[in-house]
Each structure stands twice: as C-alpha cells, then as structure tokens.
Amino acid sequence: MTTAGPVIASAVLGPGHDGQAEVVVELLYPNGGRTHLSVARTALADALDAAGVHHLDELRGQPWTVLIGSGWLP
C-alpha cells in the first residue's frame, strides 16, 4: 500500500502526566521516520469510528488522517 503521508504503526494505552491513561500513537513516515503522539483516551471512540474499526490494535496501518476530527488532532 502506498500512501502520501504517515500511517499508524501502533496505538497503545500509556500513562499520562496527570495520572489519567492516554493513547500513545506511533506514526511511521514513508521515509522510515517515526514519531509518537500522546493523546487523551477520551477521543478513542471517535478515532476508532473514523477508521471503521473496533479495537485499538486495528488502527495499525491506518492513515494518520483518521485522527483528524476525532478530537485527537485539531
């Protein structure tokens, strides 16, 4: 699959700085670069719906754009 932008390499629950769980998303860029985003767990349902999946693991391989409009990214 060829994509113009990064894809989600992984998404896991992790600790947040305020003691609340957050979702840590690793993005994989076409050039092999990687970066991590830490986002509020409360936006999870919207991101899963946008991607058309039911579980956090199923975000793997999805384009990063499923995070836009889900409350994860502006």
Image: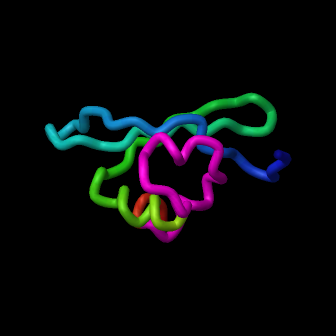
Q: Residue at x 63, y 31 (%)?
A: 34
Residue at 42%, 59% (x, y): give it.
Answer: 72
Q: On the rendered structure, is 46 left or right of 67?
A: left
Residue at the farthest right position: 2
Q: Position of residue 39 (x, y in %)?
A: 37, 49
Farthest-out residue, left: 19
Closer to us: 26 or 46: 46
Image colouring: rainbow
On whether residue 39 falls in the magenta region, the answer is no
Q: Quadrant of residue 19?
A: top left
The answer to whether residue 10 is above or below residue 59 is above
Q: Residue 8 is drawn in which quadrant?
A: top right
The residue closer to the viewer here, 30 or 12, is 12
Is 60 in the magenta? yes
Image quarter where the N terminus lies is top right
Can you name the residue that lies furthest to the front here? 54
Q: Position of residue 70 (x, y in %)?
A: 45, 66
Residue for point 53% across, 47% down? 59
Question: Is 45 on the left or on the right of 29, as rendered?
Answer: left
For the point 58% across and 41% down, the residue is 60
Query: How many marks do you count on the picture?
Result: 0
Residue 28 point in image, percent of width and height: 66, 36
Q: Is residue 45 left or right of residue 20?
A: right
The answer to whether residue 70 is above or below residue 1 is below
Q: Which residues are magenta?
A: 51-70
